[in-house]
Amino acid sequence: MPLVDQQAVHAWFMASLYKLLSFANMQGNTTDMLQELEVLTVILPHAPLPHDVPLYEEELARFARALAEGAFPALVRVRVGMEGALDDSTQDVVERTRTAAALQPLREHRLGVDVVGLHADSWEPWCSSSPPMA
């Protein structure tokens, strides 16, 4: 039996994405934070369970569309760190590829997108590092 309830973590992550999108949609362009945010860093806490993958990808795509539609007008780059998906195993490569594909609406609006694998619980140094702005 896993120590972490994967479904609860997944539900929490999706609820967090929904709250961020709701906040951005409710505030519109009136909040200074929304006007000035240039780089958004998101950490995906785990790989979804196989039966959750379609919903997970759908939520990520919805998140990407909302960002691309101007929720953050100054946004130029979205950084996505995926805990545990850092090696070259087939599963990790597929997971990173699916996540990158779900974020395609950002690329279509000329936003930079970084999707990287991270060691579990080692995301803080990556979050605080300066992203490439090329």
Image (tube, grey):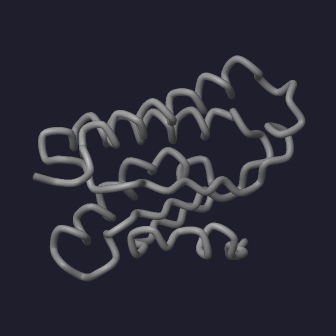
Which of these two is toward me, 117 or 67?
117
Which of these two is toward me, 132 or 31?
31
Q: Is residue 39 above or below residue 121?
A: above
| Number of dots carrying numbers | 0
Q: Is residue 84 left or right of residue 18?
A: left
Q: Position of residue 26 (x, y in %)?
A: 70, 17
Q: Is residue 22 above or below residue 40?
A: above
Residue at position x 42%, y 40% in the image? 13
Q: Is residue 31 left or right of residue 109?
A: right
**Residue 68 appears in the rendering:** yes
Q: Is residue 106 left or right of residue 130?
A: left
Residue at position x 20%, y 39% in the image? 52
- Outermost residue toward the top in this view: 26
- Outermost residue toward the bottom in this view: 88
Q: Quadrant of residue 44?
A: bottom left
Q: Quadrant of residue 55?
A: top left
Q: Quadrant of the C terminus?
A: bottom right
Q: Is residue 2 left or right of residue 75?
A: left
Residue at position x 73%, y 49% in the image? 75
Q: Position of residue 116 (x, y in %)?
A: 44, 71
Q: Position of residue 90 (x, y in %)?
A: 15, 74
Residue at position x 22%, y 54% in the image? 3
Which of these two is toward me, 51 or 9?
9
**Residue 134 appears in the rendering:** no
Q: Is residue 40 above or below residue 20?
A: below
Q: Position of residue 117 (x, y in %)?
A: 40, 72
